[in-house]
Image: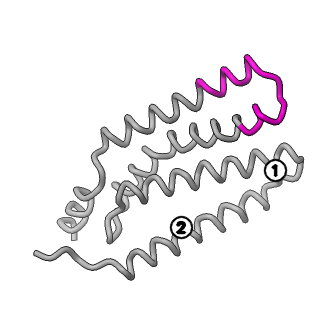
Amino acid sequence: MEDQADQLRRQLPPWHGVWITGLVMGGIGLVGLVLLFILTVPTLGPRWLMYFLVTLAMCGFALPVMHYLHRRFPSRPAATGGVLVREAILVGAYTDVLLWLQFGKTLNFALAAFIAVGLIAIELLIRLRERSTWSPPAE
């Protein structure tokens, strides 16, 4: 059993590439947000740029976390780089939705929890579909 988990962990993308990508994305997002807050006024264009930069920053910081979670809890089929990026984008989109709702003063804990459960269910269903179409590599 441990041998299978090790084999699945080896199929993950290399950690240094994931960490570098995450740091670059997170750094660009944070620096962009700082510059946006310092140098602009909150009109329509900068507000949309803020959503983009928040998504970029959160995706960058979530990417290494997703890699760690897949390394710690391997699944069959092993997560590819596309799966890691998709999950990081879901974290960024979740953050944007929460930010959007907070600006409209409609965010509460129950709504945030329902949205999180919905996004987690979507990801689990996508992974379930990948598992059902996966076939082991020919030896």
Where, quadrant-wise, is the C terminus in this rendering?
A: bottom left
| Residue at the (52%, 75%) spot, across then down | 125
Magenta-drawn stretch contains 106: no
> Percent x, y for residue 52?
65, 40
**Residue 104 locus on image (x, y percent):** 88, 47
Q: Going by the image, does 15 lie left or right of 110?
A: left
Q: What residue type is labelled 2?
A: Glu
Q: Mark 1 or 2 closer to N-term? A: 1
Q: From which residue to which does the magenta span run?
A: 31-48
**Is the stretch drawn in magenta largely helix, strand or loop?**
helix
Q: Name the residue under label 2.
A: 123
Q: Which amino acid does label 1 sit on?
A: Leu
Look at mark 1 in the image and give the residue it sits on: 101
Quadrant hosting residue 4: bottom left
Do the numbered discs 1 and 2 sit on residues whose CB atoms are within 8 Å?
no
Q: Check disc 1 and report its element: helix, strand or loop.
A: helix
Residue in view at x 41 percent, y 74 percent: 130
Q: In this view, does 116 lie to the left or right of 2?
A: right
